[in-house]
Image (cartoon, grey):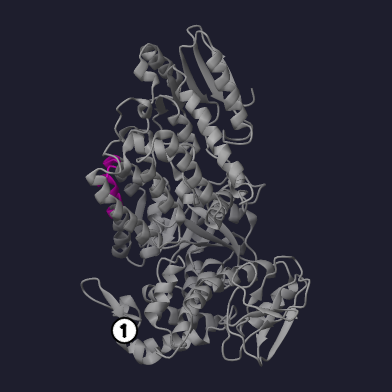
Amino acid sequence: MSGFNYEKDAIGVVTVTMDMAGPVNSMSEAFLPALQDTVEKLEAESDLTGVVLASAKKTFFAGGDLNSLCQVTEENAETFFNEAQAIKAEFRRLEKLGKPTVAAINGAALGGGLELALACHYRIAWDNKAVQLGFPEVTLGLLPGGGGVVKAIYLMGLMASNEYLIEGKRVAPAKAKEAGLINETVDSLDGLIPRAKAWIAENQDDEAACTQPWDTKGYKIPGGNANHPAVAQMLPVASAMIAQKTRGLLPAPVKILDVAVSAMRVDFDTAMRIESRGLTELALTPVAKNMINTFFFNLNQINGGASRPKDIEPQTTQKVGVLGAGMMGQGIAYVSAMAGIEVILKDISLEAAEKGKAYTEGLLKKRVERGRITEEKAQQVLDLIKPTAENTDLNGCDLIIEAVFENMALKHEITKELEPCLAEGGVWGSNTSTLPITQLAEASADAENFIGIHFFSPVDKMPLVEIIMGENTSDLALAKAFDYTKQIRKTPIVVNDSLGFFTSRTFGTYLDEGVRLLTEGVHPNQIDNLGKAIGMPVGPLNVYDEVSLELSRKAWVTWKDMGVLDNWGDGTITRDVIDTMVGEHGRGGRHHGGGFYEYGEDGSKAIWPGLMDLYYNADASVAEDDIKDRLLFRQVIEVYFNKVASKDESLTTLNTAFSKEGAYIYIPKNKMPKKPIQILHSPSKIEILLVRLSTSWIACHSPLNLLLRGHLHSKLQRSWIVSPSGFLYCKVA
């Protein structure tokens, strides 16, 4: 029996131990046949007293086959629906076996794993932090399709289940027991199966013990059904909250609520079919497919060490020095100490360093108050941070991270002064957001051990760390930086060196396009609102205010001194606007008294009236769809442009030649176009991008085909080049 080990003891208890091919148990192609064979064998047992469902893997069960989910199309949607129903049918056979069944949960049971456990009458979990339970499907654009939505409603009620189904909350066994998802916990892994068998012995003659709640006559859903006044009153609120959070961009939360409410209005089996239909509908969406690829496959690949040198042993950081106790430095100190690493937090004065440590104290206090950490543990973490103004305290650090102001000269000075404090083979990391690592490393006595480690604010909440390789950075330094990032429980992405690296450079196009739209007369509120409409947390003008217009001006001065200003596109328009805002009107940003917005003492904000006088043109006509496309696709262009350019010398050359002229990119579905293609720009509207195929003009909408829309002009001056890769570039005449 493939992947399911079947063992019957002397008193008639069968232990089914899942040990499927691969690193985890999952709903692979082999799962359904194995489950069917197992259930049939159980049904045929004459002296069966109970069943224990266990796992030989470190995880209990990993859930659905996401590869198959990504392959769902309109053509095979019915087959997918039927397969989902077939798995549920086997779960129902297990539920109606007539003998008590117990899930012995030894590791993570997420999504389909928890749904499999819910097919058992009783669930016991090892009380260990490695064991997580929940329904994370919503984070992948899906819904629990193995009975999870329906059963969660029956066990917890609609209101209590929202945080698990719609928010994708994961919990430890104790919280899962409190919520009603499991029934019991055990302190030791070795005691898990014995306790499961003991429960069966205690309940083998109890009919209620082998009957699911939803099969119990007269059972009522906790909190009431859909017609209950409290539930009916809550539904409009829940819908509004989902709309507010998702802005209509994520279909999964809406569909989950729809399925949940429907489940309360129909019989159990009908509810199951509704759930399967909902899963099928979501699996067909590009949103789900993209979320699965990004947040599961790609993320797992990154966290699995795809960018880490393979031939270097794991590296552990014992002592880290953090230079600068400001917003970034204090956050780095906190996450390092939380990982059990000794931290030397240095600033120009002891007072400033102690203020930085107080940030950790404040965060720990909140965690204690919320019951997420003990006072003893909090003190242990706090004791790991030593604030100082003395250079000698840095001696022996495995890693030193400087998080000082974005000034090349200052960073050079600090590197020369404090790099000797590193332990032998230690690594120097710069938390710069834009400055090229190769140029920063010019001050280093050992450029091989110099690397970029770019955190994002607030450090304690943001999961990403950008690791930047300089021209001379060694693989060993990369391995140490990568392993440190994993040690502090962050996700590392490794990028090559450039101005702005990957994140800042790509996101910067969003900000630049927002300012360009402003100069074209578009209402600033419309720009920021449509920025949020494409899924960004805030609009581009709002971001500039938060980052600080004044800080942007200082960064440009630094880039000019370095000789790298406009290396990645013409920033003249944005600089002119910000020079006007700061230099002529004293609008430096939110923390400088206001920028594009005015800020009230009560937390309110409104567009600065002077901005309307400077740039708004009531006669300007830019379609909303065009605004959204420009804000979104500028970033897409930047990603594609440089991803391909790194592998194509001709593209690298064209990068400099055309990016300064507002060039855009056409990416054919096929590797090479089969018909003559021209990319045309209007002399007055650089965002216009049209393709001529033979004699037909088309305005393309898909970012995989063409990245911007515009209007046709009869007489356009143009020049165009086709690269060997089939990419086409047009220079504005």
Residue 338 image point, x, y percent: 39, 48
Instruction: Count the labels in the image.
Output: 1
Which residue occupies the foreground of this view, 374 or 206? 206
**Magenta stretch contains residue 365:** yes
Q: Residue at x 35, y 87 (%)?
A: 611
**Magenta stretch contains residue 625:** no
**Quarter-of-image position of residue 28:** top right
Q: Residue at x 40, y 34 (%)?
A: 268
Residue most extreme to the left = 602
Residue 618 image point, x, y percent: 40, 89
SS for dot 1 = loop
Q: Amino acid at mark 1?
A: Trp
Which residue occupies the foreground of this view, 660 or 365? 660
* Above or below: residue 602 compared with residue 398: below
Which residue occupies the foreground of this view, 402 or 718? 718
Residue that mark 1 sits on = 608
**Quarter-of-image position of residue 602:** bottom left
Residue 650 image point, x, y percent: 74, 75
Q: What's the magenta region?
A: 362-376
